[in-house]
Each structure stands twice: as C-alpha cells, then as structure tokens.
Image: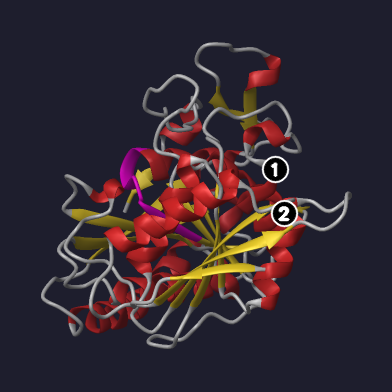
Amino acid sequence: LFVTENPDQRNMAETSPSWLVNKDVTKWGVLVDGSSVSGKAFDAAVSFLCYHNGKGVKDDLTIIHGFDPQTDADKPTYLRGSNILNSYDTLLIRARRQYESAGPHKLGTRFLAAQFKTTAELQEVSKLEWAQGASTVEKAPAVVAALLQTIHSEVHPDFLFMGSFGTGGKKVGAVGSVTDYILRLNNSTMVIIKHWRPIPKLGEPTTFVVALDDSPSSMRGLEQVIYVAKPTDTILGITVSHHHGSKDQAIMDQADALIRKHSGEISPQCHIKFYKMPAEGTTAAQVLLQAAAELEADYLCLGSFNTAHGAHSRDSMTAMGSTALYCSQNSKCHAMVVKPPRNPDSGTPVTPAVSTSPLAASAKKT
C-alpha cells in the first residue's frame, strides 16, 4: 500500500469547482415513492445541503414522485401519490429551518409529480443520435420514461438522490429496476442510498472513498466530493492497478493538485492511496469494494462513462461503465456515481436521455 498524504487539511477555498462556473444555484433532487429508503435518501440530501449555505451559491431542492392515477387508487392510502407528497410538507419545513439557520441563503423547495399510464409496452427513453438501430435504443417502463422526462425537462439536478429499492418492481442485482434505469440513464450525479446502511446524521463525520483513474468523470467526482464534504469529513482517493507505475503516479499527482486547488483553512482530511491488484481473476471493482469496506466508507464515489446513449438490453455494460455499475449495485455503503459533462467521443454536450412518448410528455408540475 502506497500512501501520499497532504500535510494540510483541505477544503474548498475561494476557487469554485469547474462544474459550478457561471452557476448561481446548485440543484438537488430526491425521488420518493413512500418507501423508508426513499425517506433516507431525502435525509441524506438534507444533510449534504445544510453545509452548503454560505458557500456562495443558492440551493434548490425538488421532491419528485411518479404515479399512475388509475392504479394509485388501489394502493394503501399512505402510498398514494398525493399523500406521499403531502407527507413531505413537514419534512421540508424542518429542512428549510435547518438550512437557513446555517447561512444567509433561503432554501428553494418544490414538489413535482410525474404522471404516467401503466402499460405493458416499453417506451423509448434513450438512443444514439448518430447510429440509431436496435442495438442503440433503450426502452423502459412508463414510470421510468415519465421520471426521466420530468428530471431532464423541469429539474436539471446537479445531484439526484434515490433509494436502492422502493415499494415494488423487479430487482436488478442488488437494486430495484427503476433505480437501475435511472442510475444508468440520468445524466446527473446519482447518489444511491442503500436500505440496509444507516446514513450519517446531520453534523456527524462522513467518510468518502473516491475511485481515481485517468477519466474526466473520475476527477470530476473528486471535485464534487470536495464540494459536498464538511470540515469533519474524511476523503480517501484510491487508484487500483497491478503495479505502481508512472501512469498511476500521474493520476495520484493530478488528484493531489485538484485537492490543493480547493484547499482552505478549515477542511476535511484528504488522502490519496494506491491499492495493488492481487493475482489474476480479481477485478478493479472487487478491489474497490474491498477497500471501501476496509476504510469503513459511508459513500463510495465512482466516475462513469456517458450513460445517455442507452442500449438495447439493460444487462448490457455499454450503457454504463462496468466498474461503476458493479460497484454501485454491490457496495455495502451508499454509492455516488458521477457522469461526465460531455460526450468523450464527439466532444459535444451530452443530449439528456428523454422519452419520446406522449405519455411521458404529459408529466405535470404540481
């Protein structure tokens, strides 16, 4: 194990992160469905939010729920769409008080209902713009199409929180099917809250483990973790390889430079570590999961390939980097998946994954 540690404590200084340049609002979204884990996702978002008041930008929090009016009437009262959103009224009042007691800004809040009609037919939600065909088009259930449409047309979140498994649906690995779709197809940074893992309470120290490689989304992930971390938190950046070569050292040096760029007087502890891969048969994803467990991570942050293009099969790894997908589904801690801001193949801005279905287009704002 090779370790390079920054002697000074690190935190965001006056320099704004690259992804915040020319922005005056950080947008946060939470997907809720009445399950206890979606409530945990809300609590996690609030705990991140409250530290940001006074960092120079305002914050907006949007609660999003997808529902089918026809099937909604058959559900228990507490799982009906209107009751789910109403249950967050008191929680949002408390969140605003906590946020506004921490700094000069007021927290913007709103509710959005993504309405859809349940049907057996899957709807197109994502496709390659330059090579459309059976293998470059992804289809999803109506609820996913409606949620993606609402997220990308009305919210544009910087961070989107959701539970690993909700009140129903098919499991894909260790997460629910809707979580699987949104994780891969949404272009925002995704924070997946695991139902079996507690979240740090407001003000408690949090440990972030960040997977580092030479991809832009990896360094973007480190920068975003630096942005959300509190002074009492710990950030551990790790890179994995068969041997500690010049490429690995260059990655560690780049990460160290990024940390120094955002250094401040009061800050979390930041360390950069190298993990050597064992013999053949062990993947980088397995090493990352083991490291996160050993380091007692609360959140494992991973950079991902562009997921806006989709694929014919949800099992296809072409829709998302295999390491990020495997780790986000199988980590014992919560997962934070950071998407690249631009399409690395064409150099052009990424087109959001939106549904072309008229059902999804009918999603209403409340």
Corner quadrant of residue 176 = bottom right
- Total labels: the figure holds 2
Left or right: residue 41 compared with residue 107:
right
- At 63% across and 71% down in the image, what residue appears? 333
Disc 2 versus disc 1: distance between alpha carbons? 8 Å
**Does the rendering let one see residue 169?**
no
Left or right: residue 136 compared with residue 9:
right
Q: What colour scheme does the image use?
A: secondary structure
Quadrant of the drawing holding the N terminus: bottom right
The residue at the far left in this view is 104
Q: Which residue is mark 2?
A: 285
Q: Which residue is mark 1?
A: 322
- At 63% across and 48% down in the image, what residue appears? 245
Residue 260 or residue 97, whichever sits in front: 260
Answer whether labels 2 and 1 touch (C-beta < 8 Å). Answer: yes
Amino acid type indicated by mark 2: Ala
Amino acid type indicated by mark 1: Ser
| Residue 40, image x, y percentages | 52, 75
| Label 1 element class | helix
Packing grade of label 1 (10 A; few <14, some 14-19, many >=20) is some
Quadrant of the drawing holding the C terminus: bottom left
Task: Please say if 127 is above or below 270.
Answer: above
Residue 168 or residue 105, whichever sits in front: 105
Q: Which residues are magenta?
A: 153-161
Q: Earlier in the sequence, mark 2 or mark 1?
A: 2
